[in-house]
Image (spheres, grey):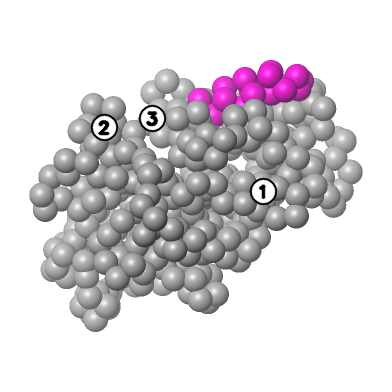
Protein backbone atom coordinates (compact mmCIF):
# COMPACT_ATOMS: atom_id res chain seq x y z
CA UNK A 1 0.00 0.00 0.00
CA UNK A 2 1.17 3.52 -0.84
CA UNK A 3 -0.21 6.34 1.27
CA UNK A 4 -0.04 10.06 0.47
CA UNK A 5 -0.31 12.22 3.59
CA UNK A 6 -1.72 15.55 2.45
CA UNK A 7 -1.90 18.63 4.65
CA UNK A 8 -2.18 22.37 4.27
CA UNK A 9 1.24 24.00 3.84
CA UNK A 10 2.15 26.38 6.67
CA UNK A 11 5.13 28.53 7.51
CA UNK A 12 6.85 29.31 10.78
CA UNK A 13 4.95 32.55 11.25
CA UNK A 14 1.57 30.87 11.35
CA UNK A 15 -0.77 30.75 14.30
CA UNK A 16 0.06 27.70 16.52
CA UNK A 17 -3.35 26.27 15.72
CA UNK A 18 -2.29 26.13 12.05
CA UNK A 19 1.20 24.80 12.77
CA UNK A 20 -0.37 21.89 14.58
CA UNK A 21 -1.05 20.19 11.25
CA UNK A 22 2.69 19.53 10.98
CA UNK A 23 2.58 17.54 14.22
CA UNK A 24 -0.35 15.59 12.86
CA UNK A 25 1.52 14.75 9.63
CA UNK A 26 4.51 13.65 11.70
CA UNK A 27 2.35 11.49 13.95
CA UNK A 28 0.75 9.76 10.97
CA UNK A 29 4.12 9.34 9.22
CA UNK A 30 5.75 7.72 12.25
CA UNK A 31 2.82 5.36 12.62
CA UNK A 32 3.07 4.36 8.95
CA UNK A 33 6.79 3.74 9.44
CA UNK A 34 6.00 1.34 12.26
CA UNK A 35 3.31 -0.33 10.14
CA UNK A 36 5.78 -0.75 7.28
CA UNK A 37 3.71 1.33 4.86
CA UNK A 38 5.28 3.36 2.07
CA UNK A 39 4.19 6.98 2.22
CA UNK A 40 4.90 10.48 1.01
CA UNK A 41 3.99 13.76 2.72
CA UNK A 42 2.46 16.28 0.31
CA UNK A 43 1.88 19.84 1.54
CA UNK A 44 -0.98 21.48 -0.36
CA UNK A 45 -0.42 25.07 -1.38
CA UNK A 46 -2.88 25.54 -4.23
CA UNK A 47 -6.04 23.71 -5.17
CA UNK A 48 -5.64 21.20 -8.02
CA UNK A 49 -2.14 22.18 -9.14
CA UNK A 50 -0.01 20.96 -6.25
CA UNK A 51 -2.42 18.26 -5.23
CA UNK A 52 -2.67 16.72 -8.69
CA UNK A 53 1.06 17.05 -9.32
CA UNK A 54 1.90 15.23 -6.12
CA UNK A 55 -0.61 12.47 -6.80
CA UNK A 56 0.57 11.97 -10.37
CA UNK A 57 4.15 11.59 -9.20
CA UNK A 58 3.59 9.37 -6.18
CA UNK A 59 0.54 7.43 -7.43
CA UNK A 60 -0.83 6.52 -4.00
CA UNK A 61 -3.41 3.83 -3.31
CA UNK A 62 -5.01 6.00 -0.64
CA UNK A 63 -4.73 9.54 0.72
CA UNK A 64 -4.50 10.36 4.42
CA UNK A 65 -6.35 13.66 4.41
CA UNK A 66 -5.14 16.11 7.08
CA UNK A 67 -6.01 19.30 5.17
CA UNK A 68 -7.68 21.81 7.52
CA UNK A 69 -7.66 24.93 5.36
CA UNK A 70 -6.80 26.17 1.89
CA UNK A 71 -4.92 29.45 1.54
CA UNK A 72 -5.76 30.18 5.17
CA UNK A 73 -9.50 29.71 4.68
CA UNK A 74 -10.92 26.94 6.86
CA UNK A 75 -14.20 26.89 4.98
CA UNK A 76 -12.46 25.75 1.79
CA UNK A 77 -10.84 22.57 3.10
CA UNK A 78 -13.79 20.31 2.12
CA UNK A 79 -12.96 21.14 -1.49
CA UNK A 80 -9.88 18.93 -1.26
CA UNK A 81 -12.05 15.98 -0.28
CA UNK A 82 -14.35 16.86 -3.18
CA UNK A 83 -11.41 16.71 -5.61
CA UNK A 84 -10.41 13.29 -4.29
CA UNK A 85 -13.99 12.11 -4.73
CA UNK A 86 -14.04 13.38 -8.30
CA UNK A 87 -10.90 11.46 -9.26
CA UNK A 88 -12.04 8.39 -7.32
CA UNK A 89 -9.07 8.17 -4.98
CA UNK A 90 -9.86 6.70 -1.53
CA UNK A 91 -9.10 9.03 1.35
CA UNK A 92 -9.36 8.97 5.12
CA UNK A 93 -12.00 10.66 7.20
CA UNK A 94 -15.35 12.06 6.20
CA UNK A 95 -16.63 12.87 2.74
CA UNK A 96 -16.69 16.38 1.33
CA UNK A 97 -20.36 16.54 2.30
CA UNK A 98 -19.65 15.57 5.92
CA UNK A 99 -16.82 18.09 6.15
CA UNK A 100 -18.91 20.89 4.66
CA UNK A 101 -21.89 20.28 6.90
CA UNK A 102 -19.85 20.16 10.09
CA UNK A 103 -17.46 23.02 9.24
CA UNK A 104 -20.36 25.44 8.77
CA UNK A 105 -21.48 25.82 12.39
CA UNK A 106 -24.77 27.42 11.40
CA UNK A 107 -25.84 24.66 9.03
CA UNK A 108 -24.62 22.04 11.50
CA UNK A 109 -26.85 23.45 14.23
CA UNK A 110 -29.82 23.69 11.88
CA UNK A 111 -29.39 20.01 11.02
CA UNK A 112 -29.11 19.06 14.68
CA UNK A 113 -32.27 20.96 15.52
CA UNK A 114 -34.10 19.32 12.62
CA UNK A 115 -32.97 15.87 13.82
CA UNK A 116 -33.92 16.52 17.43
CA UNK A 117 -30.31 16.52 18.60
CA UNK A 118 -30.00 19.01 21.48
CA UNK A 119 -27.86 22.04 20.70
CA UNK A 120 -28.01 25.47 22.36
CA UNK A 121 -30.33 28.06 20.81
CA UNK A 122 -28.54 30.37 18.43
CA UNK A 123 -28.78 33.08 15.86
CA UNK A 124 -26.34 34.64 13.43
CA UNK A 125 -24.83 38.07 13.06
CA UNK A 126 -25.46 39.60 10.56
CA UNK A 127 -29.00 38.42 10.03
CA UNK A 128 -29.73 35.12 8.22
CA UNK A 129 -27.66 33.25 5.63
CA UNK A 130 -27.92 35.66 2.70
CA UNK A 131 -25.12 37.99 3.71
CA UNK A 132 -23.18 34.95 4.90
CA UNK A 133 -23.16 33.59 1.37
CA UNK A 134 -22.20 36.98 -0.04
CA UNK A 135 -19.31 37.17 2.39
CA UNK A 136 -17.85 33.94 1.11
CA UNK A 137 -17.54 35.20 -2.43
CA UNK A 138 -16.83 38.90 -2.13
CA UNK A 139 -16.78 42.04 -0.06
CA UNK A 140 -19.52 43.02 2.31
CA UNK A 141 -21.74 45.85 1.23
CA UNK A 142 -23.70 48.41 3.18
CA UNK A 143 -26.88 46.55 2.28
CA UNK A 144 -25.48 43.34 3.74
CA UNK A 145 -24.65 45.07 6.96
CA UNK A 146 -28.12 46.53 7.25
CA UNK A 147 -29.46 43.01 7.42
CA UNK A 148 -27.94 42.82 10.88
CA UNK A 149 -30.79 45.03 12.07
CA UNK A 150 -33.25 43.31 14.37
CA UNK A 151 -30.70 41.36 16.41
CA UNK A 152 -31.27 43.57 19.39
CA UNK A 153 -34.88 42.41 19.51
CA UNK A 154 -33.91 38.78 18.99
CA UNK A 155 -31.29 38.60 21.71
CA UNK A 156 -33.59 40.25 24.20
CA UNK A 157 -36.22 37.59 23.45
CA UNK A 158 -33.96 34.53 23.61
CA UNK A 159 -32.24 35.55 26.82
CA UNK A 160 -28.63 35.14 27.80
CA UNK A 161 -25.91 34.68 28.57
CA UNK A 162 -24.48 34.25 25.06
CA UNK A 163 -21.18 33.18 23.56
CA UNK A 164 -20.02 34.64 20.23
CA UNK A 165 -18.01 32.44 17.82
CA UNK A 166 -16.84 32.90 14.22
CA UNK A 167 -19.29 30.84 12.17
CA UNK A 168 -16.72 28.99 10.06
CA UNK A 169 -13.59 28.72 12.23
CA UNK A 170 -12.25 25.76 14.16
CA UNK A 171 -9.71 25.29 16.95
CA UNK A 172 -11.27 28.06 19.10
CA UNK A 173 -9.95 30.72 16.71
CA UNK A 174 -11.70 34.01 17.46
CA UNK A 175 -12.87 32.87 20.90
CA UNK A 176 -11.44 34.62 23.96
CA UNK A 177 -12.42 35.41 27.52
CA UNK A 178 -14.48 38.36 26.25
CA UNK A 179 -16.61 36.16 24.00
CA UNK A 180 -19.27 35.56 26.66
CA UNK A 181 -21.89 38.26 27.35
CA UNK A 182 -24.41 38.45 30.16
CA UNK A 183 -26.47 41.45 29.05
CA UNK A 184 -28.09 42.27 25.73
CA UNK A 185 -26.57 45.74 25.72
CA UNK A 186 -23.06 44.37 26.21
CA UNK A 187 -23.68 41.75 23.53
CA UNK A 188 -24.79 44.25 20.90
CA UNK A 189 -21.86 46.53 21.71
CA UNK A 190 -19.48 43.55 21.54
CA UNK A 191 -20.82 42.40 18.19
CA UNK A 192 -20.53 45.87 16.77
CA UNK A 193 -16.95 46.14 17.99
CA UNK A 194 -15.92 42.73 16.67
CA UNK A 195 -17.57 43.48 13.35
CA UNK A 196 -15.21 46.43 12.83
CA UNK A 197 -12.18 44.13 12.75
CA UNK A 198 -10.56 43.93 9.28
CA UNK A 199 -10.98 40.15 9.08
CA UNK A 200 -14.47 40.05 10.60
CA UNK A 201 -16.57 37.01 9.71
CA UNK A 202 -20.21 36.21 10.33
CA UNK A 203 -20.74 35.25 13.95
CA UNK A 204 -22.65 32.48 15.58
CA UNK A 205 -24.36 33.85 18.71
CA UNK A 206 -25.16 30.88 20.89
CA UNK A 207 -26.78 30.54 24.29
CA UNK A 208 -23.95 29.95 26.72
CA UNK A 209 -24.33 26.77 28.76
CA UNK A 210 -22.96 26.86 32.28
CA UNK A 211 -21.77 23.44 33.31
CA UNK A 212 -19.39 20.59 32.56
CA UNK A 213 -17.68 20.12 29.18
CA UNK A 214 -17.06 16.72 27.57
CA UNK A 215 -15.42 15.36 24.43
CA UNK A 216 -16.57 12.10 22.86
CA UNK A 217 -14.11 10.71 20.30
CA UNK A 218 -15.32 8.08 17.83
CA UNK A 219 -13.39 5.58 15.73
CA UNK A 220 -14.90 3.46 13.00
CA UNK A 221 -14.66 -0.31 13.06
CA UNK A 222 -16.10 -3.01 10.78
CA UNK A 223 -19.86 -2.81 11.05
CA UNK A 224 -20.10 0.51 12.83
CA UNK A 225 -18.42 3.05 15.04
CA UNK A 226 -17.26 2.87 18.64
CA UNK A 227 -16.98 5.63 21.19
CA UNK A 228 -13.58 5.92 22.84
CA UNK A 229 -13.46 6.69 26.57
CA UNK A 230 -15.20 10.02 27.26
CA UNK A 231 -13.07 12.93 28.41
CA UNK A 232 -14.05 15.86 30.59
CA UNK A 233 -12.37 19.26 30.36
CA UNK A 234 -11.59 20.35 33.90
CA UNK A 235 -10.97 24.02 34.71
CA UNK A 236 -8.55 24.14 37.66
CA UNK A 237 -7.96 27.22 39.80
CA UNK A 238 -10.28 29.12 37.51
CA UNK A 239 -10.55 32.87 38.21
CA UNK A 240 -13.83 33.72 39.87
CA UNK A 241 -16.32 35.33 37.52
CA UNK A 242 -14.47 34.29 34.36
CA UNK A 243 -16.53 32.03 32.05
CA UNK A 244 -15.28 28.47 31.85
CA UNK A 245 -14.57 28.13 28.14
CA UNK A 246 -11.85 26.36 26.18
CA UNK A 247 -10.79 29.49 24.32
CA UNK A 248 -7.81 30.06 22.01
CA UNK A 249 -5.42 30.79 24.87
CA UNK A 250 -6.42 27.67 26.77
CA UNK A 251 -5.77 25.56 23.69
CA UNK A 252 -2.70 27.13 22.12
CA UNK A 253 -0.91 29.75 24.27
CA UNK A 254 1.66 27.87 26.34
CA UNK A 255 2.41 31.04 28.35
CA UNK A 256 -1.21 31.40 29.52
CA UNK A 257 -2.36 30.12 32.90
CA UNK A 258 -5.52 28.80 31.28
CA UNK A 259 -3.38 26.57 29.01
CA UNK A 260 -1.93 24.78 32.03
CA UNK A 261 -5.05 24.88 34.21
CA UNK A 262 -7.45 23.51 31.61
CA UNK A 263 -6.87 19.77 31.68
CA UNK A 264 -8.42 16.64 30.24
CA UNK A 265 -9.71 13.99 32.66
CA UNK A 266 -10.90 10.44 32.15
CA UNK A 267 -11.74 9.89 35.81
CA UNK A 268 -15.42 9.59 36.58
CA UNK A 269 -17.52 8.43 39.48
CA UNK A 270 -20.02 5.55 39.19
CA UNK A 271 -22.76 8.21 39.39
CA UNK A 272 -21.51 9.66 36.10
CA UNK A 273 -21.88 6.41 34.14
CA UNK A 274 -25.53 6.89 33.04
CA UNK A 275 -24.67 10.41 31.85
CA UNK A 276 -21.65 9.14 29.92
CA UNK A 277 -23.79 6.53 28.16
CA UNK A 278 -26.21 9.28 27.18
CA UNK A 279 -23.35 11.36 25.78
CA UNK A 280 -22.10 8.41 23.75
CA UNK A 281 -25.57 7.86 22.29
CA UNK A 282 -25.78 11.50 21.27
CA UNK A 283 -22.33 11.36 19.67
CA UNK A 284 -23.42 8.35 17.63
CA UNK A 285 -26.58 10.20 16.62
CA UNK A 286 -24.36 12.98 15.26
CA UNK A 287 -22.21 10.43 13.43
CA UNK A 288 -25.32 9.09 11.70
CA UNK A 289 -26.95 12.48 11.02
CA UNK A 290 -23.84 13.88 9.33
CA UNK A 291 -22.86 10.59 7.64
CA UNK A 292 -19.36 10.71 9.12
CA UNK A 293 -16.59 8.28 8.24
CA UNK A 294 -13.38 7.06 9.86
CA UNK A 295 -13.06 9.17 12.98
CA UNK A 296 -14.63 12.20 14.62
CA UNK A 297 -15.06 14.04 17.91
CA UNK A 298 -18.16 15.64 19.38
CA UNK A 299 -17.87 18.43 21.97
CA UNK A 300 -20.68 18.82 24.48
CA UNK A 301 -21.75 20.72 27.56
CA UNK A 302 -23.95 19.38 30.34
CA UNK A 303 -25.99 21.94 32.23
CA UNK A 304 -26.87 22.01 35.92
CA UNK A 305 -29.92 19.83 35.25
CA UNK A 306 -27.67 17.17 33.64
CA UNK A 307 -29.07 18.01 30.22
CA UNK A 308 -26.44 17.53 27.46
CA UNK A 309 -26.03 20.02 24.62
CA UNK A 310 -23.95 19.50 21.48
CA UNK A 311 -21.57 22.39 20.86
CA UNK A 312 -19.61 21.21 17.82
CA UNK A 313 -18.93 18.21 15.64
CA UNK A 314 -15.35 17.78 14.48
CA UNK A 315 -15.27 15.57 11.41
CA UNK A 316 -11.48 15.84 11.16
CA UNK A 317 -10.27 16.18 14.76
CA UNK A 318 -6.61 16.76 15.49
CA UNK A 319 -4.49 13.59 15.45
CA UNK A 320 -1.42 15.02 17.18
CA UNK A 321 -0.02 12.75 19.83
CA UNK A 322 -1.03 15.08 22.69
CA UNK A 323 -4.45 15.99 21.33
CA UNK A 324 -7.77 14.80 22.66
CA UNK A 325 -8.44 12.09 20.10
CA UNK A 326 -5.16 10.23 20.64
CA UNK A 327 -5.49 10.71 24.41
CA UNK A 328 -8.89 9.02 24.32
CA UNK A 329 -7.46 6.22 22.17
CA UNK A 330 -4.65 5.66 24.68
CA UNK A 331 -7.19 5.58 27.48
CA UNK A 332 -9.01 2.92 25.51
CA UNK A 333 -5.86 0.83 25.10
CA UNK A 334 -5.15 1.70 21.48
CA UNK A 335 -1.70 2.68 20.21
CA UNK A 336 -1.21 5.43 17.63
CA UNK A 337 -0.40 2.78 15.06
CA UNK A 338 -3.65 0.94 15.75
CA UNK A 339 -5.61 4.17 15.38
CA UNK A 340 -3.96 5.07 12.07
CA UNK A 341 -4.43 1.53 10.77
CA UNK A 342 -8.13 1.56 11.62
CA UNK A 343 -8.62 4.96 9.98
CA UNK A 344 -6.97 3.63 6.81
CA UNK A 345 -9.02 0.44 6.89
CA UNK A 346 -12.21 2.47 7.25
CA UNK A 347 -11.29 4.57 4.22
CA UNK A 348 -10.66 1.47 2.12
CA UNK A 349 -14.16 0.18 2.86
CA UNK A 350 -15.76 3.06 0.98
CA UNK A 351 -15.94 2.54 -2.74
CA UNK A 352 -15.00 5.55 -4.83
CA UNK A 353 -17.20 6.29 -7.83
CA UNK A 354 -14.49 6.80 -10.44
CA UNK A 355 -11.19 5.23 -11.38
CA UNK A 356 -8.57 6.73 -9.11
CA UNK A 357 -5.49 6.32 -11.22
CA UNK A 358 -4.80 9.69 -12.87
Please give the residue where the numbered disc 1 appears in the rendered image: 220
For label 2, the SS is helix
Residue carrying label 2: 260
Q: Residue at x 70, y 33 (%)?
A: 341
Q: Locate residue 256 relative to residue 356 in the image: left or right.
A: left
Query: Is residue 211 part of the magenta span, yes or no?
Result: no
The residue that label 3 is drawn on is 16
| Residue 295 in the image: above or below residue 53 | below
State the image quarter where residue 192 is shown. bottom left
Q: Give the range drawn in magenta.
A: 23-40
Q: Is the magenta stretch mostly helix, strand or loop?
A: helix
Between disc 3 and disc 2, whose residue precedes? 3
Q: Which of marks 3 and 2 is in front?
A: 2
The answer for how far apart the CA atoms under marks 3 and 2 are is 16 Å
In the picture, measured across the screen, residue 322 lies left or right of residue 123, that is: right
Residue at horizontal 22 percent and vertical 70 percent from the top = 160
User: Could you tell me residue 239's position as x and y percent?
Assistant: 12, 45
Tag nearer the camera, 1 or 3: 1
For the N terminus, give its image quadrant: top right
Q: How far apart are marks 1 and 2 (CA)?
A: 31 Å
- Nearer to the camera, 146 or 211: 211
- 201 above or below 325? below
C-alpha gap between disc 1 and disc 3: 29 Å
Outermost residue toward the left in this view: 240
Q: In which quadrant of the rendered view does residue 212 lie?
A: bottom left
Residue 72: in sight, yes or no?
no
Residue 288 percent across, percent down from the top left: 63, 63
* Crowd band around label 1 with a 10 angstrom C-alpha radius: few (<14), some (14–19), many (20+): many
Cβ atoms at labels 1 and 2 below 8 Å apart: no
Compared to residue 237, the image places residue 24 above or below, namely: above
Amino acid sequence: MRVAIIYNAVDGNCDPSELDVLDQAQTVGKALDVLGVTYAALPITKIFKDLMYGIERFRPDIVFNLVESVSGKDELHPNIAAVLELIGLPFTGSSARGLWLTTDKIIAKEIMQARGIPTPDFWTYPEDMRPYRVCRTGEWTADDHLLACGHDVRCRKTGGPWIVKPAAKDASIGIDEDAVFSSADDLMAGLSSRWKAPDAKPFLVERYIHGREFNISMLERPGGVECLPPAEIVFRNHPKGRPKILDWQAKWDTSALSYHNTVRSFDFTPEDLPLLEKLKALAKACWKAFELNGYARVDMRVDENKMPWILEINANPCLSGNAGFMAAAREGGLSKEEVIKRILEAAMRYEQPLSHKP
